Amino acid sequence: MYKEKIVVKVGTNVMTNKDNRIVRPVLRELVRQIAELYERGIMTILVSSGSVIAGKEVLGKSKIKDRTQKRQVYSAIGQPRMMRLYYNIFQDFGMKCAQVLPTKRDFSPGIHRQNMINCCEGLLSEGIVPIANEDDAVSVTMSMFSDNDELASLIAQLLDADKLIILTDIDGLYTGHPEEDSSDLIKNVNPDEDLDKYIQDNNKAEGEGRGGMGSKLDYAQQAAAKNIPTFIANGKKDNTIIDIIEGKSVGTKVSL
Ligand SMILES: Nc1ncnc2c1ncn2[C@@H]1O[C@H](COP(=O)(O)OP(=O)(O)O)[C@@H](O)[C@H]1O
Ligand SMILES: N[C@@H](CCC(=O)OP(=O)(O)O)C(=O)O
């Protein structure tokens, strides 16, 4: 059995370049760290975005006008592509992974919630890394998460994870626009601190990520309030996950 379990969320912008193409070495570096943690007895539940952008890579521009339908189509094409990439990389590291595609209903009290716990715990007990993404092909309106930051926070709370690590394309939460010299990285945040004033407007296009830093902070604070130390850190840099596990000062730590 394992001695610790962590949830790692990887956003679309971590795994893509400026042309919105998926960068395989980024996924490889992520899996390398998960494999290293596995050797140390730490199991990871990976929450990975990327299906919409992967679908766009395959289909290119779509004729579909309706945004919801377009998202369904892109993600239905892109999700198996993401899983093929992960499957092959995990295999290179001698590990197995599995796909879990929840909708919001799976977290409401009752049988669905228990099924979700059973599924993830079962995979972990077999030494298999669950890779979760919102089931974008079927989840619309009521059954939607606001984004995968919410999904990652809910999974961390559901499984009572030891840590939640939210990887993005920036070093953490800044006191202003991250590209301005006057902005500083905030190292520590409490679950009840109101830092909305620091959040800058999101100008990302369709498929380039949904939540933004505001949502990361909200869901990080929700998990931290349940005593799950949560980190917002840069997934484009090497060794970020291992550095966090080893207690190095990386990213923004949200904790009680
Ligand atoms: N105060 C802030 N500190 C850091 N990043 C911020 C801040 N306000 C807005 N952002 C933006 O949030 C982005 C990360 O959110 P998002 O695009 O949703 O990423 P992901 O695809 O990883 O979920 C950063 O690239 C940055 O431009
Ligand atoms: N479920 C969608 C991603 C939604 C989302 O939250 O994206 P992001 O803000 O990049 O983590 C996908 O796989 O494309």
Image (tube, rainbow, N blue to C red):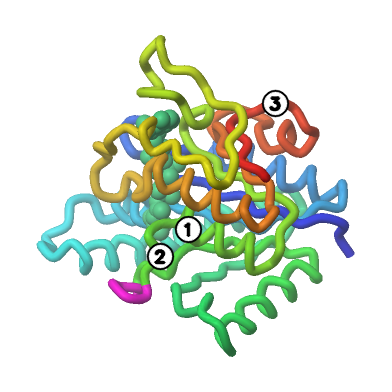
Which residue is located at x 76 percent, y 39 percent?
245
Pick the residue in front: 208 or 62: 208
The three-letter amino acid code for the residue at tag 3 is Ser
Residue carrying label 1: 150
User: Which residue is identified by label 2?
Assistant: 145
CA gap, disc 1 and disc 3: 24 Å
Part of the protein shown in magenta: 138-143
> Residue 39, percent across and down?
86, 48
Horizontal relation, residue 1 to residue 211: left or right: right
Task: Give the residue displayed 36% in from the left and 23% down from the top.
Answer: 177
| Residue 191 horizontal side relative to residue 242, left or right | left
Measured in 3D between alpha carbons, the distance from the residue under mark 2 to the one under mark 3, in whole angstroms, is 30 Å
Decide: is 153 above or below 181.
Answer: below
When the figure is inspected, residue 245 is found, relative to residue 148, above or below; the finding is above
For the N terminus, which image quadrant? bottom right
Residue picked out by circle 3: 249
- The percent coordinates of residue 157 (x first, y second) are 63, 63
